[in-house]
Image (cartoon, rainbow, N blue to C red):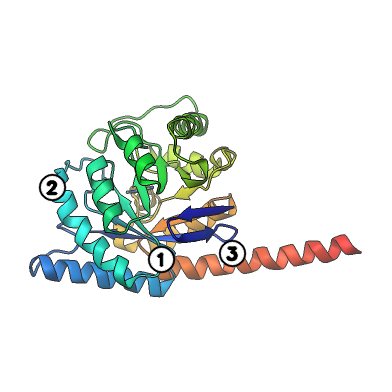
């Protein structure tokens, strides 16, 4: 499977790593705007050196309970960083936003992928992505970041998430977004209990069966903290376990804070898959 993002064509036969670059005030603060921007750019370049295939730049937190940020502030946070990275970076840049105005500004600055946790459901979002002719990641979320963890319930989480994503892909295609540009994401932690997240991970085949590239993001999430009793910064090992399980179950892109460790883990997965393929080919010839 291939994914075209502007001038970049990603071959998804080997899983890809999306490095997370948060440019919210609490992530790269202190020292004024320029220092914060430079720190963010250097962090992104370090992630690329560590093996990131995509950098996802976000200016509004989507954590449970997070407040909304104005269009102006979000643009002021993400655009200078995307502009700087577009000049220095060899990998595709993604913008994590649900606002059409931010999508347009970020793409003008050099982004070629829109990562939307609202799956383009906000007014004008589908039209913006259609006009901009960039890639899009459609994510499932139950509720909004403010309310999503207030007792989410499902009859069958894998079925309901798969049905939602299937409907959104169909709607986007019918609105003129090329199918080849669409990625789907079950949205771990977005309106889901720990049990929902674990069941979704076990039944990732339901999402893979939609026939689009699947992106997963479990890095440092609360479910991993609940399972291990560890603080966010100490969830690298559990995040790697989740990423490896996801890739083994068919995920194509892993969104992570911990790029170097994820790249090492996925190198082992890829080597194991390559050896198995060669072995099966030679067995078939016998
Ligand atoms: C912005 N963001 C936070 N978590 C995410 C996830 O799991 N997937 C995607 N696509 N975006 C996310």
Q: Is 192 drawn above or below residue 221 in the view shown?
A: above
**In x, y percent, where is residue 130?**
38, 40
Q: Marks 2 and 3, Cα distance to the nearest angstrom?
A: 42 Å
Within 10 Å of disc 1 (Cα), the crowding (few <14, some 14-19, many 20+) is: some
Give the class, few, some or many, for how many residues have Cα within 10 Å of label 3's Cα (few <14, many ≥20).
some
As drawn, which residue projects farthest toward the front? 131
* Residue carrying label 1: 91
Toward the viewer: 139 or 263? Answer: 139
Mark nearer the N terminus (2 vs 3): 2
**Could you tell me if the residues under marks 1 and 3 are in contact, i.e. CB atoms within 8 Å?**
no
Report helix, strand or loop for mark 2. helix
Q: Which residue is mark 2?
A: 72
Secondary structure type for disc 1: loop
Could you tell me how far apart the alpha carbons at marks 1 and 2 are, in whole angstroms? 26 Å
Residue displayed at 44% across by 64% down: 53
Mark 2 lies within 8 Å of ligand 1 (Cβ measured): no
Of pointers 1 and 3, the one earlier in the residue sequence: 1
Which residue appears farthest toward the top when viewing the image? 155
Residue 268: x percent and y percent? 58, 69
Question: Residue 48: percent from the left, percent from the top?
Answer: 38, 70
Residue 129 locus on image (x, y percent): 36, 42
Q: Could you give the CA–CA distance between mark 1 and mark 3, rounded to whole angstroms?
A: 22 Å
Residue occupying image coordinates x 18% and y 51%: 75
- Classify 67 as above or below 27: above
Residue named by callout 3: 269
Decide: marks 2, 3 in contact (CB < 8 A)? no
């Amino acid at each position: 499977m291939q994914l075209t993002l502007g001038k970049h064509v990603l071959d998804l036969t080997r899983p890809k790593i999306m490095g997370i670059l948060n440019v919210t005030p609490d992530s790269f603060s202190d020292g004024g705007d320029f220092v914060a921007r430079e720190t963010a750019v250097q962090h992104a370049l370090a992630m690329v050196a560590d093996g990131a295939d995509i950098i996802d730049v976000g200016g509004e937190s989507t954590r449970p309970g997070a407040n909304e940020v104005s269009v102006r502030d979000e643009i002021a946070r993400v655009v200078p960083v995307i502009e700087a990275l577009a000049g220095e970076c060899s990998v595709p840049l993604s913008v994590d936003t649900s606002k059409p105005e931010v999508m347009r500004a970020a793409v003008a600055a050099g982004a070629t992928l829109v990562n939307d946790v609202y799956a383009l459901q906000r007014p004008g979002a589908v039209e913006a992505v259609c006009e901009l002719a960039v890639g899009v990641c459609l994510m499932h979320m139950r509720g909004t970041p403010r309310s999503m963890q207030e007792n989410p319930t499902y009859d069958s989480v894998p079925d309901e998430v798969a049905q939602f994503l299937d409907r959104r892909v169909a709607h986007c295609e019918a609105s003129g977004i090329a199918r080849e540009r669409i990625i789907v994401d079950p949205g771990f932690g977005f309106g889901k209990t720990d049990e929902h997240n674990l069941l979704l991970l076990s039944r990732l085949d339901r999402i893979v069966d939609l026939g689009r590239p699947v992106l997963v993001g479990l890095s440092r999430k609360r479910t991993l903290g609940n399972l291990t009793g560890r603080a966010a910064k100490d969830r690298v090992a559990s995040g790697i376990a989740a990423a490896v399980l996801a890739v083994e179950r068919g995920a194509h892109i892993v969104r992570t804070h911990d790029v170097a460790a994820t790249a090492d883990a996925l190198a082992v997965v890829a080597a194991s898959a390559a050896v198995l393929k060669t072995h099966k080919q030679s067995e078939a010839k016998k």
